[in-house]
Amino acid sequence: MLASDERRVVQVARRHVWVYEGGRTVHRRVRGGVDLVVGDRVMVDPDGAVSRRLPRDNVLERATPKGRRVLAANFDDLVVIVAARTRDGGEGLVARVVAAAYRAGAEPLILGNKADLDADGRLAARIERWRRLGFEALTASATRGEGLDALRVRLRGRVACLVGASGVGKSTLINALLPEAGRRVGHLGAGGRGRHTTTLATG
Ligand SMILES: Nc1nc2c(ncn2[C@@H]2O[C@H](COP(=O)(O)OP(=O)(O)OP(=O)(O)O)[C@@H](O)[C@H]2O)c(=O)[nH]1
Ligand SMILES: [Mg+2]
């Protein structure tokens, strides 16, 4: 929950942010020295500028040659998306994101998308393997709408951070889950080479 003068950052670009307030996304300037990521809770001054970041409950970090970089903050669920017939980072990426979720004190959720392309059952077998290991893992088809009801129920009222390789269907999923997503979703290019992107959705 946010206090009345608190806002949630859904998108960041240098000294500008977009914050979710009153049911829509509003552009705000950021005062110098305030470093923001998607998910940050901020205070807005009477003149409309963002002047202060509230303490972060948790963060998603990425190791870079220059040290650790914060990618997102204040999320309940960290969802790692893989997909049938897609270069998706494999089980190594899933394991890294699950570990990051535990570090952040967030719930990891593994989502196998493009189930409609899974004629050979490879995706289903991967998801089943994670389930047998005790992890929460679901399958879906963002384009066909399969599995989305379960996902909606699971994420309702929570803040989810979606992570996955380019092309696994993050944007398609968000658009299917939150048709009004333009107002509630921030996208963040998270890889040095843009290989992964991070999306934060507030439900
Ligand atoms: N067959 C099938 N195609 C899908 C599904 N979900 C997404 N796609 C397709 O996969 C492609 C990539 O989807 P995006 O939603 O753009 O993927 P993304 O993860 O947002 O990719 P980046 O923004 O590059 O990180 C698009 O052509 C989608 O239509 C699905 O469930 N089934
Ligand atoms: Mg996308």
Image (cartoon, helix red, strand yellow):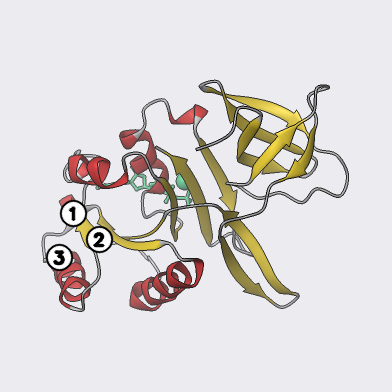
Q: Residue at x 37, y 71 (%)?
A: 94
Residue 100 in the figure: left or right of residue 53 = left
In space, the residues marked 2 and 1 are separated at their CA atoms by 6 Å
Give the amino acid type for the residue marked by disc 2 in the picture: Ala
- Residue drawn 38% across the image and 40% down it: 174
Identify which amino acid the numbered label 1 is placed on.
Answer: Ala
Quarter of the image with the C terminus in it: top left
Mark 1 touches mark 3? (CB < 8 Å): yes
Indicate the secondary structure of the residue bearing disc 2: loop
In this picture, residue 148 sits left or right of residue 108:
left
As drawn, the label of residue 84 is 2
Residue 83 lies, in percent from the top left, at 29, 59
Q: Residue type at mark 3?
A: Ala
Q: Earlier in the sequence, mark 2 or mark 1?
A: 2
Is the CB of the residue bearing disc 2 within 8 angstroms of ligand 1?
Answer: yes
**Residue 24 in picture, x, y percent from top left:** 54, 22
Q: Would residue 142 be seen by someone viewing this image from the given angle?
A: no
Q: Secondary structure at mark 1?
A: helix
In contact (CB < 8 Å): disc 2 and disc 1? yes
Name the residue that disc number 1 marks.
115
Q: Secondary structure at mark 3?
A: helix
What residue would you read off at disc 3?
A: 124
